[in-house]
Amino acid sequence: MQGVKKDNKPAKAAPANEISSTTVSLYYSHIQIMLIDNSASIRFPMLRQIIRFSLATALSIAATTSSFAAQLVMVDQKGCHYCEAWLDDIGPAYPKTAEGKFAPLLRRDISLGAPEGSSFQRRVNFTPTFILLDKGAEVGRIEGYPGEDFFWPLLNQLLKDETTFEDSLN
């Protein structure tokens, strides 16, 4: 065959200075976990197994811990003007506030229902709807977005009434 070169040599190994790595970052209520697996660069198989086991253990602990934290689910949909207003007015500041650190935000499309491992008390009919989850179960909700001046007090009161949240201002 013309133009085809047969080469029976084995493929060359990757240079020793190249490192294969995996980085996993998890954000939960008050914790950020960052795990870096550079085990491909480790020459001792037993050490490589220990690192992989540690990574898997840390991920499972983080996943289990997250199900016990309070979480605010924002149910929205494409084209929702009030959802966009909330994202403009409050979205950038929310994770930096005491409320946002206590109950991190999870955005969820209205067509998807409750997040896996969680449940809503009733169907969501309006967007945005803010559903407060504690240990995966709905403990309260705010339907609609009444504006920044009303949203913060409503959320603050909901958190104080339904969770262990303590406002730093009082």
Image (spheres, rainbow, N blue to C red):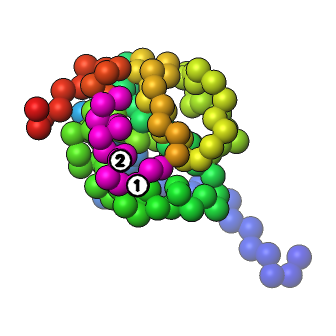
Q: Amino acid at mark 2?
A: Phe
> In the rendered structure, which segment of residues is drawn in magenta?
145-158
Task: Identify the residue at horizontal 45%, vertical 21% (top origin).
Answer: 139
Distance CA(mark 2)–CA(mark 1)? 6 Å
Q: Which residue is mark 2?
A: 150
Give the side of residue 104 with respect to residue 119, left or right. Answer: left
Secondary structure at numbered mark 1: loop
Residue 22 drawn at (x, y percent) = 40, 45
Task: Identify the residue at horizontal 25%, vertical 19% (top origin).
Answer: 164
Q: Residue furthest right?
A: 1
Label drawn at residue 147: 1
Residue 29 drawn at (x, y percent) = 30, 32
| Magenta region, main secondary structure | helix
Q: Amino acid at mark 1?
A: Gly
Say above or below: 94 vs 37.
below
Give the side of residue 2 with respect to residue 41, left or right. Answer: right
Residues 59 and 135: in front is: 135
Q: Are marks 2 and 1 in contact (CB under 8 Å)?
A: yes
Say above or below: 112 vs 45.
below
Examine the image and state in which quarter residue 105 appears: top left
Q: Is residue 2 magenta?
A: no
Quadrant, the C terminus: top left
Residues 115 and 123: in front is: 123
Task: Identify the residue at horizontal 51%, vertical 61% (top origin).
Answer: 84
Residue 76 drawn at (x, y percent) = 58, 48
Q: Residue furthest bottom?
A: 3
Task: Identify the residue at horizontal 53%, vertical 57% (top origin).
Answer: 82
Q: Is residue 146 magenta?
A: yes
Residue 141 drawn at (x, y percent) = 48, 31
Say above or below: 167 vs 61.
below
